[in-house]
Amino acid sequence: MGSMMGWETVLSAAWTPRDGLALDSSDLPVVFADALGRVAHDLHVRQYNGSIAHIRWVAEYDDHTGVVFLLSDVTATGRAADGLGASGGGAALDADEEAIVASMAYLVQDQVARARIAWPWGDADGFMSPMLSDGIAVWADHRVGSRSRIGEL
């Protein structure tokens, strides 16, 4: 079943503050579920300006490029769901976990921001950015120059 023209749905999952990550289905290598688990772990901490009630995730695979994109539907407490969306780049089907985590964190963070919630919130105010640092997926707090491995906030 595909939702984008020429794309195939390869993962379905949800996250709530109470239950954490629930993986409904996945046709991807296990490293994708592990990566999503790391991102989901950090959703429990450092939110600002509202809270996340629910996130629905769908991953789409483009067999022409070999790239997997994570789409997020974020529901903020007291508001309606924003609908599936993403911006930025996906991760190659054969990427390592760190590259997948950085891609997923970026795509989820963008949708969380569209729901008017800053996540993850840094130690010195402002939000942190996902990036690869020496091959490791980290949250970078540019205001204070600190970095925290994604999945360990």
Image (cartoon, grey):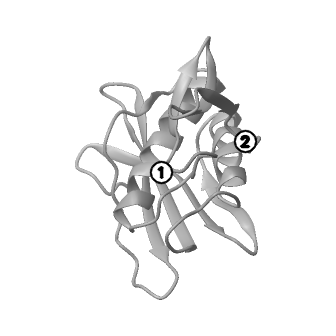
Check the image and report above or below for 152 versus 99. below
Q: Is residue 122 left or right of residue 61?
A: right
Task: Identify residue type, mark 1.
Answer: Val
Tell me the residue at 65%/27% (across/down): 97
Residue in the picture at 39% in, 68% down: 115
In the picture as drawn, the residue positioned furthest to the bottom comes out as 78
Q: Camera-side residue: 102 or 127?
A: 127
Q: CA distance from mark 1 to mark 2?
A: 14 Å
- Lower position in the chain sequence, tag 1 or tag 2: 1
Residue 124's place in the image compared with 131, above or below, is below
Residue 149 locus on image (x, y percent): 70, 32
Q: Is residue 53 above or below residue 117?
A: below
Residue drawn at the location 57% of the way across and 52% of the way down: 121
Of 148 and 92, nearer the camera is 148
The numbered disc on residue 140 is: none
Q: Is residue 110 left or right of residue 10?
A: left
| Front-lying residue, 40 or 64 | 40
Q: Nearer the viewer, residue 72 or 49?
A: 49
Q: Which residue is mark 2?
A: 151
Residue 94 visible in the current orientation: no
Across and down, in percent, residue 134 comes to 62, 11
What is the three-letter code of the residue carrying label 2?
Gly
Residue occupying the point 48% across, 76% down: 76
Instruction: Categorize mark 2 by other alpha carbons within 10 Å: few (<14), some (14-19), many (20+).
Output: some
Callout count = 2
Q: Position of residue 84 (x, y in %)?
A: 36, 63
SS type, badge 1: helix
Q: Give the residue number, with chain letter if any, for mark 1.
A: 108
Quadrant in the picture for the C terminus: top right
Instruction: From the viewer's perspective, tell me whether residue 44 is left or right of residue 107.
Output: right
Name the side, left or right, on which 135 lies relative to 115.
Answer: right
